[in-house]
């Protein structure tokens, strides 16, 4: 049996929506499992020579996690990952690996988990909800903890949104380091500021993109993470000065900007890679 899963990159937080908002982007990893081939793990593309090619690979570990939870056993297989999502750049590479592993294991084990249960297991492994929710559902998502567990509401992004992903070549930021930089407590006025900006962000991303410049402002995580990545901080401020809507993508160091067509975009030079992906409306798919 051969199974293939396609999982999108995600840009989470989207400014004020810390651990809640995420946008799926048409930048994909494709992971294939072949149960008729000899057991092995191979990685090509982004992360080749860096990601483990053994049982410690995150896709493999996620498959094993679901097998333990379901009380089943996986067959022997060859796992091949063809990756286009950069590592440690705030684009949900670990969430994509987790989702890929769970979808493959769900099909191999015949557990037939529903979308909400898949989301909950993915969050158990990943540790936070926004990236895995966006990867699973596609489009724009709002993740929240309900009385029945983690849930994600799918929102339709405005058709005029034109994302621009700005990746620094020489800065990387592991999520664990980015989370360590966050304060354990925040002033009430900052929390209230983010509540208002998050509501505004939902309106801007779905109905009125002209509000994005203000809507992406944040006081909970961006002011604490940008000092860890000086090049990204300098570009962030430059784009803000040019009235270009911009936020830190996930934990960073990549930035997510939106092309409005009425503001000049600076020449970033050789230290940056610029991507203009479409919004992925489908989410993770398996065949």
Image (cartoon, rainbow, N blue to C red):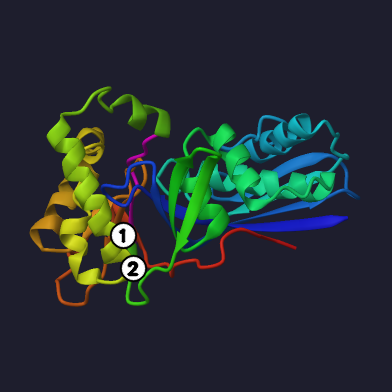
Q: Are marks 1 and 2 in contact (CB under 8 Å)?
A: yes
Q: Quadrant of the N terminus?
A: bottom right
Q: Position of residue 158 (x, y in %)?
A: 35, 72
**Which segment is the magenta one?**
165-174
Does residue 168 belong to the magenta stretch?
yes
Label 2's element? helix
Please tell me which residue is depicted at 21% across the width and 51% down the height of the picture: 197
Q: Quadrant of residue 268?
A: bottom left
Please tell me which residue is depicted at 50% across the width and 32% down the height of the picture: 127
Residue 85 visible in the current orientation: no
How many numbered discs sit on the rendered protein? 2
Q: Position of residue 262 (x, y in %)?
A: 15, 76
Does residue 11 belong to the magenta stretch?
no
| Residue with the most extreme left position | 241
Residue 1 got which mark? none
User: Mark 2 highlights which residue?
Assistant: 206
Label 1 neighbour load within 10 Å: few <14, some 14-19, many 20+: many
Please tell me which residue is depicted at 37% across the width and 76% down the height of the picture: 159
Q: Position of residue 257 (x, y in %)?
A: 27, 60
| Residue with the most extreme right position | 36
The chief SS type of the magenta part is loop
Above or below residue 252? Residue 212 is below
Q: Quadrant of residue 74?
A: top right
77 left or right of 148 in image: right
Please tell me which residue is depicted at 58% across the width and 33% down the height of the picture: 125
User: Mark 1 highlights which residue?
Assistant: 202
Above or below residue 73? Residue 152 is below
Q: Position of residue 224 (x, y in %)?
A: 22, 33
Label 1's element? helix
- How far is mark 1 from mark 2, CA to CA? 6 Å
């Amino acid at each position: 049996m051969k199974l293939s899963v396609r999982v999108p990159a995600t840009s989470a937080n989207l400014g004020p929506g810390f651990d809640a908002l995420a946008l799926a982007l048409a930048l994909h990893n494709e992971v294939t499992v072949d149960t008729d081939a000899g057991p092995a793990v191979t990685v090509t593309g982004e992360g080749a020579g860096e990601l483990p090619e053994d049982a410690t690979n995150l896709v493999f570990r996620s498959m094993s996690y679901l097998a333990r939870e379901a009380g089943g056993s996986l067959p022997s297989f060859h796992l091949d990952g063809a990756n286009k999502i950069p590592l440690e750049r705030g684009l949900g590479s670990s969430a994509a690996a987790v989702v890929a592993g769970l979808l493959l294991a769900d099909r191999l084990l015949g557990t037939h988990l529903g979308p909400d249960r898949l989301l909950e297991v993915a969050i158990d492994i990943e540790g936070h909800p926004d990236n895995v929710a966006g990867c699973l559902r596609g489009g724009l998502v709002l993740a929240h903890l309900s009385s029945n567990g983690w849930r994600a509401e799918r929102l339709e992004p405005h058709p005029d949104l034109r994302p621009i992903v700005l990746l620094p070549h020489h800065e990387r930021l592991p999520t664990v380091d980015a989370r360590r930089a966050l304060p354990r407590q925040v002033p009430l006025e900052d929390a209230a500021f983010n509540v208002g900006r998050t509501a505004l962000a939902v309106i801007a991303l779905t109905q009125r993109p002209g509000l994005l410049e203000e809507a992406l402002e944040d006081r909970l995580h961006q002011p604490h993470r940008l000092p860890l990545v000086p090049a990204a901080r300098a570009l962030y401020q430059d784009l803000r000065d040019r009235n270009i809507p911009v936020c830190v993508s996930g934990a960073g160091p990549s930035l997510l900007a939106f092309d409005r067509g009425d503001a000049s975009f600076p020449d970033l030079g050789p230290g940056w890679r610029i991507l203009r992906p479409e919004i992925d409306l489908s989410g993770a798919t398996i065949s």
